[in-house]
Amino acid sequence: MKTHTPRPQLRRRHRRGQAMVEYSFINWILVFGLILTMSVDFGDGKQKMNVIDAFLRAYQVYYDSFYFVLNLPFP
């Protein structure tokens, strides 16, 4: 009886999947570490937020000001 030998393509797929899992895990650790450790003081020091929140807050201010200018009654 003939034994089934694994094809080389299947082995390559498995290794590529393992690399993607490792890459995703390392990125998750880095992003989570940045969120936890990086904090910024705004104003008097009572209000602290992490860097991601600061960028999202700045983007929201930009977005609101852009639509404020578009909704002005001037032609």
Image: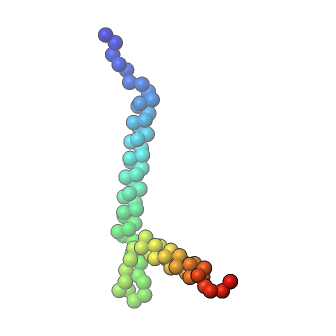
Which x, y percent locates residue 14? Answer: 39, 36
Return the residue found at the far left. 1
- What residue is rendered at 41% in x and 37% in y? 15
Which x, y percent locates residue 2? Answer: 34, 12
Return the residue found at the far right. 75
Return the residue found at the far top. 1
Along the horizontal axis of the image, is 13 left or right of 1?
A: right
Please, is residue 3 above or below residue 51 in the view? Answer: above
Residue 51 visible in rendering: no
Return the residue found at the far bottom. 44
Q: Quadrant of residue 31?
A: bottom left
Tally of numbered tags: 0
Q: How is the image coloured?
A: rainbow
Please, is residue 2 above or below residue 46 in the view? Answer: above
- What residue is rendered at 36% in x and 58% in y? 29
Residue 3 visible in rendering: yes
Specify the quadrant that holds the N terminus: top left
- What residue is rendered at 39% in x and 54% in y? 26
Q: Quadrant of residue 75?
A: bottom right
- What residue is rendered at 60% in x and 79% in y? 70
Which x, y percent locates residue 66? Answer: 57, 78
